[in-house]
Image (cartoon, helix red, strand yellow):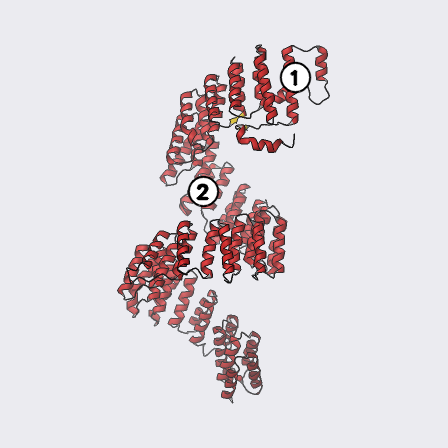
């Protein structure tokens, strides 16, 4: 009967429900544990069909049997079947029943191994260690297979040192390592960048009668290539040949893949060329994977010409047929912004009958969104649906990110609704996009509501979510809420970025004691402070003028963390600059050089500024020369300050030398130096030099600042050089400059006082013509005409008393003449930075057409 039941069950294995009914009928009349073969059959059938309720019912029936010992083997069989089918929770439930119900015999090693293997496959690595400890407690001796699984789990968890200790103790415990043991350890070393340690194990293999196989050699070759140790990889290849193991296409593909991932495309291409050559029969020919790997490397490195040539070769050789190849090439075109070609390739893929999937369309949608073509991406989603391909979470998330980046809240909300309607629920990544957008838009209430909904819906709150929340709270002034969120018992699992945001906010508020507490809390949690945390403290102390405290943090940073960065030094230098302490800045700069920290533009700018303020222009000039030699971009404000100091100290020769030396290195901002020096020369009464310099600026068509040309014309008029001032205006007009029309008035007035009415009238006409041609605002035009009327009255002599009274009592809104004249002299309509009108014609037309 027992054998017949097992046979019946096996015959009905394809119909698990029917088999279960047969078995339940049998259970009513006999003890199921009395038929081990039937138990084995039904356990395997139910486990393969993943019929969890039925498995639990069987489990309960087995536990109810009396005496209990009769169900021991049956429970072992059921646990084995559940574990092998990946029903890990059920297997562990059955395993715990064994451990609770039977003090002896202990579970067999084969059950432990099956549970270990299943835990590893399901990535439940924490269970591996629990099982291993239970084996030791139960005095079950692990075998080599058990140790291998434990080592593999430790390696996957990044606990390589512990895995090595297990490996080293295996011989002592009567389980010498086998080829798989060596393979696990070598792979663990290679994956963590310790390929040399992996290679050392090759010499140990002979002690245990093991010889390295092709897989181990390929692992080492790939590891060395990934670490950039090409010579070591070649040594492994030579050793492989000496062991009569010829490098195969997998070996070469491993080398090419590792080199491509490391960005060493030239070396990967050389290996590829060797594979293509017919001269060496020992070298394998490239296969589809080889071509795809190199093409992907070329695309990611943006080596466009080489990638196009390889793609053409692949087409010629009939290797451009698989979807994976098309995906690589499509991603490359999108990466380079060649969307028209990408669109053509997508059409080619569709016409060739290739089964396009969501991943295919997501590549193109991502490219369109990256270029800001969100409406085109939306249209492609419609095409995607029309072709029977459903958008997935990645599709919707990409669109959502694009809308949020453009701050199109309505479209983002519509996309979110579409996700829900398409039964494509948002995941953590999607919610994080929305969360960042809400905080960026200054909508903290909605952001906090979204976080609550994530918890309600069971969406994982990951570190990105927490960091976004904490950063948003800190930036919106809710520092205390952020502190509570990060504190003990909070929902946030903080990392160094989380603490950095909180510490930064506390330091900005001057709450340094609380910031220090957070630093200590971070240390207690085993989170090591990085450079940014120390820099945050330094900047915080410097912003509040606490130089001594900031220096203390700098010294602690050197001891505890690492060498301070230029950013940390610059914060201190900036504070010293505010306190006018150039000697301390110089000392700190020398310290930077001694520690190998290169001063950047910010360092030099602060020092030059302080030296200029202290009147130490020679040292400042020397520093500027050093910046030029080092290739550090010259800061225009520092150069301007240097020239002003030189002018004010009367060292005009050095000022002119600095102007001519550095003006060509100012990245299109040399006009700032010309305008500044012209103003300084005018202020010092050096009118000939100022006029000469101003004419040079006009000849170069440099933008002119209003203060510069107005100071020059006014100074020339005061210095009885009215004709020269008139010539300056004529030169500006002849060069096409559009400038403040009020610049004419001092010259016109001075010419009138001197009795040169024809020249004054000529300039007046030019001023009105300039206003008319450049369409200044109608109100400005009115005031200018009124000012000219005032000027003409001045030429005609003082008005009568009745005329003065009439002028003062005008009700047309113009006010008295002097007030209007001052208003015009202050300038209107033209801005402060002037360029020749040919460069701004379109701008003026656009701005003033509506007024006319």
User: Is residue 580 something one can see in this rendering?
Assistant: no
Image side of residue 811 versus residue 331, left or right: right
- Looking at the image, can residue 215 be seen? yes
Helix, strand or loop under label 2 = helix
**Looking at the image, is 428 positioned above or below residue 118?**
above
Q: Nearer the viewer, residue 282 or 12?
A: 282
Number of residues whose C-alpha sits closer than 10 Å to that of mark 1, classed few (under 14), some (14–19) or many (20 or more): few
Residue nearer the viewer, 467 or 391 = 391
Left or right of 656 on screen, residue 517 = right
In percent of the image, x 61 and y 55: which residue is there?
Answer: 416
Identify residue for label 2: 553
Quarter of the view holding residue 658: top left
Sequence-first disc among 1 and 2: 2
From the top left corner, tell me how far across and down residue 464 is, in percent: 53, 53
Q: Residue furthest bottom?
A: 1
Q: Residue at x 49, y 73 (%)?
A: 85
The disc placed on residue 629 is none
Locate residue 353 relative to residue 181 in the image: left or right. Answer: right
Is residue 592 rendered to the left or right of residue 94?
Answer: left
Find disc 1 in the rendering and name its residue: 789
Q: Label 1 to label 2, Cα distance in Å?
A: 69 Å
Dividing the picture into quadrants, the one containing residue 170 is bottom left
In the foreground, 349 or 129 = 349
Residue 488, horizontal then vertical, whole percent: 54, 54
Residue 404 percent coordinates (x, y):
58, 49
Q: Nearer the viewer, mark 1 or mark 2?
A: 1
Rate crowding at label 2 as few (under 14), some (14 to 19) or many (20 or more) other CA atoms within 10 Å.
Answer: some
SS at circle 1: helix
């Amino acid at each position: 009967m027992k054998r017949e039941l097992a046979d019946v069950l096996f015959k009905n294995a394809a119909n698990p429900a029917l088999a279960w009914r047969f078995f339940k009928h049998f259970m009513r009349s006999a003890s199921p544990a009395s038929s081990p073969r039937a138990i084995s059959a039904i356990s395997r059938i139910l486990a393969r069909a993943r019929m969890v309720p039925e498995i639990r019912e069987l489990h309960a029936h087995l536990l109810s049997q009396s005496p209990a010992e009769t169900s021991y083997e049956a429970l072992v069989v059921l646990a084995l079947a559940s574990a092998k089918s990946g029903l890990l929770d059920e297997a562990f439930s059955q395993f715990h029943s064994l451990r609770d119900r039977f003090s002896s015999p202990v579970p067999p090693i084969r059950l432990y191994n099956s549970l270990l293997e299943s835990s590893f496959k399901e990535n439940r690595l924490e269970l591996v260690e629990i099982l291993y400890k239970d084996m030791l407690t139960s005095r079950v001796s692990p075998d080599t297979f058990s140790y291998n699984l434990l080592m593999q789990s430790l390696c996957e968890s990044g606990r390589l040192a512990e895995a090595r200790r297990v490996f080293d103790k295996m011989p002592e415990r009567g389980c010498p390592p086998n080829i798989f043991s060596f393979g696990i350890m070598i792979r663990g070393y290679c994956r963590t960048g310790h390929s040399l340690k992996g290679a050392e194990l090759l010499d140990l293999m002979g002690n245990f009668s093991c010889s390295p196989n092709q897989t181990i050699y390929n692992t080492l070759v790939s590891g060395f290539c990934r670490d950039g140790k090409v010579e070591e990889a070649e040594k492994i290849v030579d050793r492989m040949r000496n062991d009569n193991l010829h490098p195969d296409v997998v070996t070469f593909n491993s080398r090419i893949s590792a080199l491509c991932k490391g960005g060493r495309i030239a070396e990967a291409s050389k290996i590829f060329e060797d594979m293509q050559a017919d001269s060496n029969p020992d070298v394998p020919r490239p296969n589809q994977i080889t071509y795809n790997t190199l093409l992907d490397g070329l695309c990611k490195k943006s080596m466009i010409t080489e990638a196009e040539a390889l793609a053409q070769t692949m087409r010629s050789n009939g290797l451009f047929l698989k979807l994976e190849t098309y995906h690589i090439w499509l991603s490359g075109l999108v990466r380079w912004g060649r969307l028209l070609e990408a669109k053509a390739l997508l059409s080619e893929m569709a016409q060739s009958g290739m089964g396009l999937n969501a991943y295919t369309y997501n590549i193109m949608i991502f490219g369109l969104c990256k270029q800001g073509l969100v409406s085109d991406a939306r249209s492609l989603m419609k095409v995607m649906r029309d072709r029977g391909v459903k958008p997935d979470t990645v599709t919707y998330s990409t669109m959502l990110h694009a809308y949020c980046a453009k701050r199109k809240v309505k479209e983002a909300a519509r996309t979110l609704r579409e996700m829900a309607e398409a039964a494509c629920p948002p995941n953590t990544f999607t919610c994080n996009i929305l969360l960042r957008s809400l905080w960026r838009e200054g909508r903290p209430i909605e952001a906090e509501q979204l976080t609550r909904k994530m918890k309600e819906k069971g969406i994982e709150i990951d570190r990105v979510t927490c960091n976004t929340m904490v950063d948003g709270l800190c930036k919106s002034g809710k520092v205390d809420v952020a502190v509570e969120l990060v504190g003990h018992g909070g929902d946030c699992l903080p990392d160094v970025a989380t603490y950095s945001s909180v510490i930064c906010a506390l330091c900005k508020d001057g709450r340094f004691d609380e910031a220090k507490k957070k630093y200590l809390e971070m240390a207690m949690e085993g989170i090591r402070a990085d450079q940014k945390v120390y820099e945050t403290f330094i900047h915080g102390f410097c912003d509040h003028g606490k130089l001594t405290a900031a220096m203390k943090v700098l010294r602690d940073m050197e001891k505890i963390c690492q060498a301070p960065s230029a950013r940390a030094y610059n914060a201190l230098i900036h504070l010293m600059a505010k306190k006018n302490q150039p000697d301390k800045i110089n000392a700190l700069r020398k310290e930077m050089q001694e520690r190998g920290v290169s001063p950047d533009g910010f360092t030099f700018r602060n020092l030059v500024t302080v030296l200029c303020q202290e009147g130490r222009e020679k040292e400042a000039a020397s520093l500027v020369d050093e910046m030029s030699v080092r290739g550090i971009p010259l800061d225009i404000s520092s150069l301007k300050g240097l020239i002003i100091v030189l002018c004010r100290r009367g060292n005009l020769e050095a000022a002119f030398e600095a102007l001519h030396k550095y003006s060509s290195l100012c990245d299109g901002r040399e006009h700032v130096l010309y305008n500044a020096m012209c103003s300084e020369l005018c202020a010092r009464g050096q009118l000939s030099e100022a006029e000469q310099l101003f004419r040079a600026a006009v000849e170069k068509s440099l933008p002119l600042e209003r203060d510069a040309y107005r100071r020059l014309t006014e100074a020339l008029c005061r210095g009885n050089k009215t004709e020269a001032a008139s010539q300056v205006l004529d030169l500006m007009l002849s060069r096409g400059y559009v400038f403040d029309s009020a610049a004419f008035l001092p010259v016109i007035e001075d010419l009138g006082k001197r009795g040169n009415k024809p020249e004054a009238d000529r300039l007046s006409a030019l001023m009105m013509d300039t206003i008319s041609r450049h369409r200044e605002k109608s109100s400005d035009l009115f005031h200018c005409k009124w000012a000219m009327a005032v000027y003409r009255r001045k030429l005609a002599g003082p008005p009568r008393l009745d005329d003065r009274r009439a002028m003062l009592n005008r009700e047309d809104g113009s006010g008295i003449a002097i007030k209007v004249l001052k208003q015009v002299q202050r300038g209107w309509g033209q801005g402060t930075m002037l360029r020749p009108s040919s460069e701004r014609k379109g701008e003026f037309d656009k701005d003033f057409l509506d007024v006319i």
